[in-house]
Image (cartoon, rainbow, N blue to C red):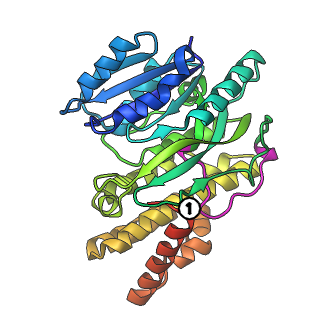
Amino acid sequence: MKLLSVIIPCYNSQEYMNKCIDSLLPGGEDVELLIINDGSRDNTATIANDYATKYPTIVKVIHQENSGHGGAVNTGICHASGVYLKVVDSDDWVDYEAYTIVLKKLKMLLKQNANVDMIISNFVFEKEGKKHKKVMKYENVFPQDSIFTWDGIGQFRKGQYIMMHSIIYKTELLRECGLKLPKHTFYVDNLFVYKPLEHVKRMIYINADFYRYFIGREDQSVNEKVMIERIDQQIKVNKLMIEQVNLANIENEKLRQYLLNHLEIVTVISAIMLIRSGTQENLKKRTELWNYIKNKDMELYQNLRYGMLGKLINLPGRAGRKISVGAYKISQKIVGFN
């Protein structure tokens, strides 16, 4: 059994996957790298196979028909043999020094039989053309280097939330919670983070800038134009988050509040992208999304629609929509996303 399984979903990744894989190889025999070739049509398969030949005890390659990011992650979870599991996208990479710190901590947890469900670390927005790199830290929220529960967390700031890049889950927990991501759907990383959280009991935070999240390719899923083109998939994930986690059943108040805040951010992004598209069709979809939430859960609707962000993105008329978009652009600069 390995200490850590790392799932690397790859689709036509020949231009950048080497950097990703090379950054993870220093984990050595403690780590299992699961390269999921998701029906690539370029040299991804050959590159992956070469790594598996060179590092047969570390790298495992799985070739499958294209099923999207979610399908690749599902496959990786099924094949993972590590005690812990992390997803690293093929255009991202990890920092060597932080990687060493994280693996040392995982070894310690395993040696102590600490039974930790989730490990959180920082990530860096590696935004193309930006000299200053925004870092998503959590030192204001989580105790450092000690095991804690939801009762021990502080308050998240607006725009500060747990992303796929931040977390390492216990593999067993992901299987036991029944996580199954939809195929051929973008933005499923929100579900990957969100659904298992209600099953997480014990956590530890490592204040190290571990994950390097690259932003800058024109075809990247978080590119604003691409998000608008794929808005139906964003809405699909938004609705699945509501359907798969019933906030009314969450007993711990701090966990419930976090889940509500995370859902608020995803819903705000959905609504803003629908506004940004500028089409009447998408403005109708925005109305339909709010009606869906209202019909699904009135209390949730009240919290999302009439919270600070909900009010801001629902200002009436064309002028109101311009103000909403302007506020979103400011938050982009402050938080560093997209």
Residue 28: horizontal and vertical position, in percent? 53, 17
Residue drawn 48% across the image and 34% down it = 87
Residue 4: horizontal and vertical position, in percent? 56, 22
Q: Is residue 29 above or below residue 167?
A: above
**Residue 164 located within the stretch drawn in magenta:** yes
Q: Is residue 35 above or below residue 145?
A: above
In the depicted view, which residue is nearer to us: 64 or 243?
A: 64
Residue drawn 47% across the image and 73% down it = 329
**Residue 249 located within the stretch drawn in magenta:** no
Q: Quadrant of the N terminus?
A: top right
Q: Is residue 326 above or below residue 185?
A: below
Stretch of the chain drawn in magenta: 150-165
Image position of 26 (left or right of 37): right
Q: Main secondary structure of the magenta part?
A: loop
Q: Quadrant of residue 8?
A: top left
In the picture as drawn, the residue positioned furthest to the front comes out as 131
Residue drawn 28% across the image and 76% down it = 280
Image position of 18 (left or right of 39): right
Residue 311: horizontal and vertical position, in percent? 56, 77
Q: Quadrant of residue 210?
A: top right
**Residue 88 seen by the camera:** yes
Q: Which residue is mark 1?
A: 264
Q: Quadrant of the C terminus?
A: bottom left
In the depicted view, which residue is nearer to us: 45 or 163?
A: 45
Q: Quadrant of residue 71?
A: top left
Element type at mark 1: helix
Residue drawn 58% across the image and 43% down it = 166
Image position of 201 (left or right of 122): right
The residue type indicated by label 1 comes to Glu
Q: Residues within 10 Å of mark 1 (few under 14, many from 20)?
A: many
In the depicted view, which residue is nearer to us: 75 or 85?
A: 85
